[in-house]
Amino acid sequence: MFSPDGACLLVSDGRPSFLLSVDVANRTVVTSLSSLQAQAVEFVPNNANNIILAADLTNNEIHVLTLSAGCALTEGTPVATPGTGPRNIAALPNGQIALVAHNDGTIGVLSINGSSVSFSTSFIIGGNTASAALRAQGLFCRTAARPMLTSVALEMSSC
């Protein structure tokens, strides 16, 4: 996944100890993080602190990372959300809320304020949630048990 300005590339394939940041212009690896298994990585839009969220499937938590100039990644304090096996993250365009889809059908809601990320609430859609995508029409979740999309209407006035 490229940074919003295209200068950095984050690479993860879900293996333990494999999250890299790459300086695109110089074609060099800048940071290699060995403390997490990043199943999904999401840049938080409209965030001056360059926050990145990484779903750690093995440790069952969301890592809060900061991308600095030169493509260096810095780890912050991880955030736990209810549910088992965070698989995917979708940040709202306003940069204040992110949704985390878990294997057990739980969707965790994170609140983002500057560089602070905290758990807000959660809800259950059921089934094994393979992925979640946020669109203007709502949250769409694909479950492993049913290969169809489940639409969840969200009422969030700050979106």
Image (cartoon, helix red, strand yellow):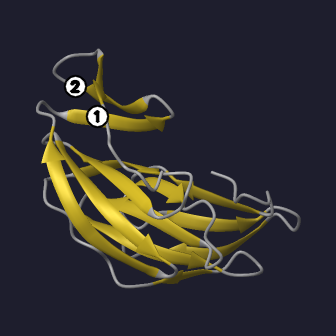
Q: Position of 35 compared to 69: left or right?
A: left
| 89 in relation to 32, above or below | above
State how far apart marks 2 and 1 are (Cα).
6 Å
Q: Residue under circle 2?
A: 144
Tell me the SS state at disc 1.
strand
Name the foreground residue: 4 vs 144: 4
Which residue is depicted at the point 45% across and 28% down?
137
Q: Position of 71 compared to 78: left or right?
A: right
Q: Residue under circle 1?
A: 130
- Report the disc number at residue 11: none
Tell me where residue 62 appears, x and y as whole percent: 33, 67
Which residue is depicted at the point 45% across and 65% down?
53
Q: In this figure, what is the number of numbered marks?
A: 2
Tell me where residue 67 appears, x and y as whole percent: 63, 76
Question: Type of residue at label 2?
Answer: Ala
Tell me the SS state at disc 2.
loop
| 11 in relation to 19, above or below | above
Report crowding for label 1: few under 14, some 14 to 19, many 20 or more residues within 10 A (C-alpha): many
